[in-house]
């Protein structure tokens, strides 16, 4: 199971226990009571899996949305910083971050008829992955969070890292 699919339900276990659903004519309030043991187990699993996203991906830029905005699912600041540093160090490029290493989506050699590539075929995708500017937004939001106020926010499209 991928980290992204696991992280948001983990956050939900620790969220306020009341939520409202608005219908056309009324608002219905719902309550839920999670088992604290399950919530703790989910938090431990999430923390222990970072910075990897899954067994098949060393790092994944989508993890930025788990450790930072919008989920803020990890409380350990050192683990968050280590995850963000790993993502920036391995995936950041001139125009954005790669989703993950050897990602074939939107590349010129992408085969739209296939769901996955064999391991030996992934070597063809190395160093041609698309860079997604959206992930610069997540990195910027990470730098702007209150615990990083003393660090300079320096992001430039002029020089690749």
Image: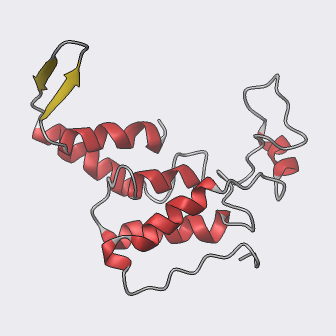
Residue 1 x, y percent position in the rendering: 47, 35
Q: Position of residue 134 (x, y in %)?
A: 60, 54
Vertical placement of 89 versus 62: above or below?
below
Image quadrant occupied by the C terminus: bottom right
Could one spot residue 132 in this view of the protein?
Answer: yes
Q: Nearer the viewer, residue 109 or 65?
A: 65
Q: Residue at x 76, y 77 (%)?
A: 158
Q: Residue furthest front?
A: 25
Residue 133 falls in image quadrant: bottom right
Using residue 59 as the reference point, say whether residue 94 is left or right of it: right
Query: Is residue 60 visible in the rendered structure shown here?
Result: no
Percent across and percent down for residue 42 are: 27, 43
Closest to the observer, 69 or 53:
69
Give the percent coordinates (x, y) of residue 70.
38, 50
Q: Is residue 54 above or below residue 80?
A: above
Total marks shown come to 0
Whether residue 39 sits left or right of residue 138 in the image: it is: left
Please tell me which residue lies in front, 88 or 3. 88
Res 116 → quadrant: top right
The chosen color scheme is: secondary structure
For image coordinates 31% across by 36% down, the residue present is 9
Residue under the image location 72 percent in, 72 percent down: 157
Q: Quadrant of residue 148?
A: bottom left
Q: Is residue 61 left or right of residue 47?
A: right
Q: Is residue 13 left or right of residue 154?
A: left
């Amino acid at each position: 199971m991928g980290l992204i699919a696991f992280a948001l339900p983990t956050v939900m276990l620790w969220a306020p226990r009341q939520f409202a659903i608005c219908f056309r004519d009324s608002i219905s309030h719902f309550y839920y009571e999670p088992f604290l043991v399950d919530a703790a187990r989910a938090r431990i699993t999430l923390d222990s899996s970072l910075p990897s996203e899954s067994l098949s991906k060393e790092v994944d830029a989508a993890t930025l949305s788990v450790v930072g905005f919008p989920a803020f699912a990890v409380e350990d600041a050192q683990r968050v910083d280590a995850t963000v540093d790993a993502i920036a160090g391995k995936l950041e490029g001139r125009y954005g971050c790669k989703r993950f290493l050897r990602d074939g989506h939107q590349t010129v050699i992408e085969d739209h008829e296939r769901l996955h590539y064999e391991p030996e075929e992934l070597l063809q995708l190395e160093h041609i992955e698309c860079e997604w500017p959206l992930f610069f937004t997540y990195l910027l939001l990470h730098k702007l969070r209150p615990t990083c106020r003393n660090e300079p926010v320096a992001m430039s499209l002029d020089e690749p890292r």
